[in-house]
Image: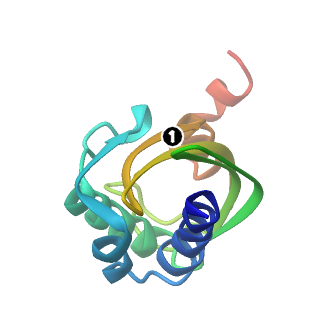
Amino acid sequence: MRIETNRAIARYVAEAVWNQGRLDVIDEVFAPGFVNHDPSAHQVRNAKALKRWIERLRIAFPDMHMTIEDLIAEHDRVVVRWKWTGTHTGFYGSIPPSYNAVTLHGVTIERFVEGKIAEAWWSYDGSAMMLQIGAFPVAMEAGR
């Protein structure tokens, strides 16, 4: 039954945290010593930093939405293949709004301990998002 509980928590995080912006859920379902592994957001190492990062994302992309495309659970791990969409209508760091629609695809592996997410590994193309919001010169897009 633990596998089904972990699967349900992964779905809950996608809906409540990513889609609804309910950051209080992070305290509920992430372990106190949560460790985040995200090469595109290396500064986001724990639950507190994860909250700040999601807050900033929601300012830049207030309509952001995560769709779970696959969810595989085994032992203490849940693998989520997702699609993330949003419209860049607010500042993303120092990058002004482009009003562009953004789509990212990625995979997150979550490790659970006693019903809480203790660790997460992310894989996605962060530079694809930067290109979509116009943060890279057009010459880069053309491969020049």
- Nearest the viewer among 19 and 92 is 19
Identify which residue is drawn at 61% across, 57% down: 3
- Nearest the viewer among 55 and 112 is 112
Identify which residue is drawn at 57% across, 45% down: 108
The N terminus sits in image quarter: bottom right
Q: Left of 42 or right of it: where is 105?
A: right
Residue 82, x across and y down, in percent: 70, 54
Residue lying furthest top in this view?
Answer: 144
Q: Left of 52 or right of it: where is 70?
A: right
Residue 59, x across and y down, in percent: 40, 74
Name the residue tied to disc 1.
122
- Nearest the viewer among 46 and 42 is 46
Q: Is residue 81 above or below residue 57?
A: above
Residue 46 appears in view = yes
Count the marks: how many? 1
User: For the residue carrying disc 1, how many other residues have a C-alpha within 10 Å: few (<14), some (14-19), or many (20+)?
Assistant: some
Q: Quadrant of residue 60?
A: bottom left
Residue 112, x across and y down, in percent: 43, 51
Residue lying furthest right in this view?
Answer: 69
Residue 136 appears in view = no
Q: Quadrant of residue 114?
A: bottom left
Identify which residue is drawn at 65% across, 34% down: 138
Indicate the secondary structure of the residue bearing disc 1. Answer: strand
Amino acid type, callout 1: Trp
Q: Is residue 78 above or below residue 15?
A: above
Identify which residue is drawn at 60% across, 36% down: 125
The C terminus sits in image quarter: top right
